[in-house]
Amino acid sequence: MQRAIDYLARTLALIRKELLALLKDPSSRTLLFAPAVLQALLFGYGATYDLTHVPYAVLDQSRGAASTDLLARLDGTGVFKRVATLTTPSQIAEMIDDGDALLVISIPSDFEARLASGRQAPLQVILDGRNSSTAGSASGYVSSIVASYNQSLGNTSSITVVRRAWFNPNLESRWNMMPALIASLSMLQTLLLAALSVAREREQGTFDQLLVTPFTPLQILIGKALPSILLGLVQSTIIFLIILFWFQIPMNGSVWLLYLGLFMFTVAAVGIGLSISAVSLTMQQAMLYTFILVMPLMLLSGLLTPVRNMPAILQLATYVNPLRFGIDLVRRVYLEGAGFGDVAFDFVPLLIVAALTLPLAAWLFRHRLN
């Protein structure tokens, strides 16, 4: 019992020391040219707002010649890719919720009859408002195709498009961007703090003294990781409160599930940061490695552009990016009200990253060659 108390006391003392070091040591460095080159390349390939791939589903209850002709025009653009042909309205929610389709086109059963009688024929377009910029562009493209089809009929107002955006009714880009910042801004802070923790002590010459103390590698790992995790969660909380109360973006999901996901995401980010810190001899090296890594993680996360719009090779690279799954989890819980079963897949990569990087960092603490 006494041994366990002593073990806990030493660990808490190390955590307290690390917290004091983090809170009393604000630092800044000038970016070198290498991150700028990497950022320029990734912006050119990853951060594109061009509308090149729009997965959509169709619920055609008319099944007439007019609806078939209209959908053929849509498919013929090369931009819209039909991923599903639905049979019942209840299937619409599943397509949007799972992110399989950016939009669903619903054609009513009396569509053909309305056109034949010269009346207006409404066409409903259901959009995924979690990706407001692309959804808005896709909706505008659909409207232009409908307008062209109306002209071919000799009537400019036969078919009307009725837009309905889920999870973001007004397609405000702020609703899409702000919840994602809960994860992305937190990662910037925690990754940098964790990356500097060991490197700072190596530079000051105190890390070797720490290794010869009675602290075990696990205690050193906890002492280095926990302060960064706590500070990351505090920053996430501040951003969350600003979004919820200042910008008044309503939250539809569970706060507990949100924080469970944020905790797992922050642990994965700290694991990466500690691994960087363990291989860095100086703080300058740690900051350089961090800045080189941060921009690819941001660009390949889906924060600015959908992952499905990126080249295939970059889409594969996103599977080792914890920020991709952190942002997806936060957006789905915050905007969609998703439950644990809906976002369980996002936890798997985060657990894998944490399980690989934290033991790696602990091993590198003692085996890093100077």
Image: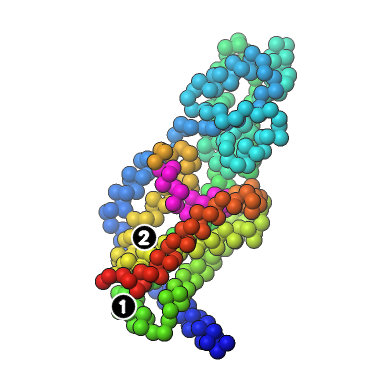
Where residue 231 appears, as percent x and y from the top left, is 50, 68
Q: Nearer the viewer, residue 332 or 2?
A: 2
The relative height of residue 228 versus residue 337 in the rendered view (above or below) is below
Q: Could you say whether the residue bearing mark 2 is in a helix, strand or loop?
A: helix
> Which part of the image, by quadrant, shows the C terminus?
bottom left
Query: Is residue 302 positioned above or below 245 on the image?
Result: above
Amino acid type assigned to the residue bearing label 1 in the image: Gln
Q: Picture coordinates of residue 60 (x, y %)?
A: 66, 23
**Residue 211 or residue 263, whichever sits in front:** 211
Q: Which residue is mark 2?
A: 290
Residue 88 screen position, x and y as percent: 71, 30
User: Where 38 falls versus 218 (above or below)?
Assistant: above
Q: Which residue is depicted at the point 42% across and 38% down?
A: 312
Residue 324: within the magenta? yes
Q: Residues within 10 Å of mark 2 (few under 14, many from 20)?
A: many
The residue where tag 1 is placed is 204
Question: Mark 2 is on which residue type?
Answer: Thr
In the rendered image, which quarter is residue 270 located in?
bottom left
Name the residue nearer the viewer: 217 or 71: 217
Point 59% across, 61% down: residue: 260
Left or right position of 308 against 278: right
- Which range is magenta? 314-331
Q: Which mark is residue 46?
A: none
Classify residue 279 as left or right of residue 353. left
Quadrant where the image shows the N terminus: bottom right
- Image check: 306 left or right of 250? left
Q: Is residue 90 left or right of residue 227?
A: right
Q: Quadrant of residue 46?
A: top left
- SS state under label 1: helix
> Is residue 68 at all visible to an observer of this figure?
yes
* Cβ–Cβ under 8 Å for marks 1 and 2: no
